[in-house]
Image (cartoon, grey):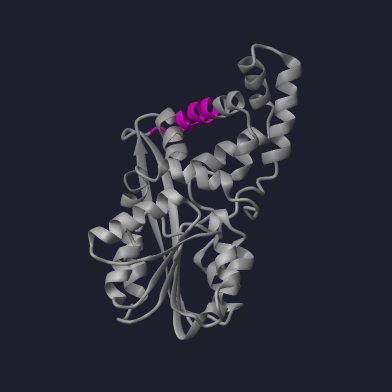
Amino acid sequence: MAVDSPEFTQLTYDKVADAYDDLWSRYVAEPNAKLTRALVLKRGERVADLACGTGLFTVPMAQAVAPGEVVGVDVSEGMLAAAQKRAEAQGLRLTLDQDKIEDFVAQARPQSFDVVSLRFALAYIDWSRVLPRIGAVVRPGGRVGVLTNTTASVPQFYELFDQYRRSFDAAWKLYKHFRKSFGEAWRIYWQLRDTFGDGAFISVPDTADTVVERLAQGGLQPVETWTDRIRLWFRSGEEAVAWMEESGYATHPTLEHVSPDTLRFLETLFAEGLEGFREPQGIPLDFVIAGVVARK
């Protein structure tokens, strides 16, 4: 599912920009470093870093290709401001562009980049269409690197999601949440079913092979693929849900249309459900990360 208007995602990441690296980036430092190494960057090359975020992984690429140009693209003004500050602290210059990935790729000149990097952004774009188009902006011999969560990530949430959308248990809890107002609970139940019922709002590749297939449609051939797994621990289901929101991981424009009271209900529902996954170390959330580097 494509993000037709970036406002909701932009506002969410503007808010989280200052804390984003602590909440998310530090956990995926090694997959990001692996991707940068696999791109085999050379001095003087021109690089596009799509969804550059705070520039934590953009700056090392700029160091590797200096005096070549690195263009950092992100929809969030707050993220770009952080990237600018980080680059300046290292005495480096980034060309920053506040733009949607789809629009940037569509408007970029053919064969204008040696390298394109796209990290943890496929959930926010129509990746099935965008990935094949990236090949057109890469020069012969150029490389494209992609990091993404796959559909196997956060299985704990998906298991609860399937459980809730297939039973009326959630409807009963919704009824109690809204102080036994049957009409209000029934209306919101069907609104949630219409919005989330078929799971179509979840859109990331199944595996690294899926990414390879889409890139191949744009004339790119795989050089290296891998899969990494990480596990995060939380003291409670409530803390895990809060992290999903605060890190931006659960960001999706469909949530913009959910009322604050309904959102609080969903937070409580999933926090309670996650307690069923408790282990001695706490509540686990598992992430499966696919990495792909392809060459033109």
Give, as a single range, the part of the protein colored magenta: 267-278
Viewer-nearest residue: 269 or 12 = 12
Left/right of residue 53 with respect to residue 201 in the rendered view: left
Percent of width and height locating residue 91: 23, 65
Of residues 252 and 225, which is closer to you in this image?
Answer: 252
Magenta-span inclusion, residue 66: no
Q: Is residue 294 above or below residue 206?
A: below
Rendered residue at 65%/45% (across/down): 199
- Res. 90 in view: yes
Residue drawn at (57%, 79%) of the image: 136
Q: Position of residue 29 (x, y in %)?
A: 31, 57
Q: Is residue 187 left or right of residue 282?
A: right
**In the figure, 255 relative to 81: above or below?**
above
- Quarter of the image containing the N terminus? bottom right
Magenta span main SS: helix
Q: Camera-side residue: 70 or 191? A: 70
Residue 74 lies left or right of residue 7; in this view the side is left
Check the image and report above or below for 194 versus 201. above
